[in-house]
Image (cartoon, rainbow, N blue to C red):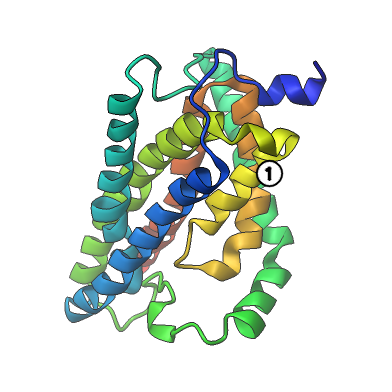
Amino acid sequence: MTRVESVVELGSPLAKHAPAQSILLHLVPGALALGIYVAAVPLVGRLGMPTIAALALSGLVGVVPVQVALLSRHRRQHPEEAVIQLRTRLPLRRVVGWMLLEVVLGALAFLVAAPLTGWLRAEVFGWWPASLITDPGTQPSYGTGALTATALLMLLGSVLAAPVVEEYYFRGYLLPRMPAKWGRGRPVAHAALFAGYHFWAPWLISTRLLAILPLTLIALRTRDIRIGIATHVVLNSVDVAILTRYLRSR
C-alpha cells in the first residue's frame, strides 16, 4: 500500500456511497440552505438587519436539521456501523497545533486567491443579485439593536451550530464513504464538493477549495474530527469579531 493509499484508507470497511449518491449528499443540503437564505433575506431586511443575519438563520433552520436528519437516516439504514468516523482522540496540544496550522493555511488560501475571487465575482457571477450578496453589517445605516441581534444570531448559527454539524456530516460521515472508484482523488473530490456546497457565494468556490483541501488531508491523516470542528469555528468567528468590533466603535 502506498503512502497516499494509506492516508485515504480509513480502516474497517464502510458502506461506500455511489458517485451520484455522494454528489447529491454533498450538494443538496447546500441547495436547501441557499433556498432558506433567499427566503430569509426579505425577512431580516424588514427587521433592519443585514443579509448576513439571513445566512446565520439558514445555518440554524437549514443546515443543522437537514444534515442531522441525513445522519439519522444512515444510522437507521446501517445500524451495524458507526455513522461518524474519525473518532481518534489526539492529545489536546496536538489538536491545537493542527488547528492553528489549518487556520493559517485557510487564511493564506483566501489571501492568495483574492484576485481570482474578485475576477469571478465581477466577470463570471456579475449577474448575481446584489440583494443576495452577504452584507457584514458594518454600515451606519443599521441600528445598534439590529446589529446586536445579528451578532447573536451569527454566534448561534454560523459559529456554534452550523460548523459543528457540518464537520460531523462532511468530514465524519461523507469523507470516509467517498466512492471507492474515485481512488486517490477522493480527498480532492470531497474538498471540491464541499466548496461547491456553499451555493450562496459561488465566486468563493476556488478559494474554499484551496482552504478546505488541507483540512481534508489533515482529517484523513489524524482521524480526529475535533481538529476540523475547532478550525471551522475559529474561521467562522471572524465575521462575528468584525461586527462586534464595529459595534464597539460606534
Q: Quadrant of the N terminus?
A: top right
Q: Quadrant of the C terminus?
A: bottom left
Relative to residue 3, is residue 150 depicted above or below?
A: below
> Would residue 107 be visible to someone looking at this image?
no
69 to the left or right of 187: left
> Would residue 52 be visible to someone looking at this image?
yes
Residues 224 and 27: in front is: 27
Q: Which residue is mark 1?
A: 188
Relative to residue 52, is residue 218 depicted above or below?
A: above
Residues 247 and 3: in front is: 3
Q: Indicate the position of residue 42 as horizontal and vertical percent values.
A: 24, 79
Residues 122 and 29: in front is: 29
- Residue at 56%, 21% in the rendered image: 223
Q: Indicate the position of residue 20 as horizontal and vertical percent values.
A: 53, 48
- Residue at 41%, 25% in the rendered image: 84
145 to the left or right of 154: left
50 to the left or right of 226: left
Relative to residue 145, is residue 66 depicted above or below?
A: above
For badge 1, the amino acid type reads: Val
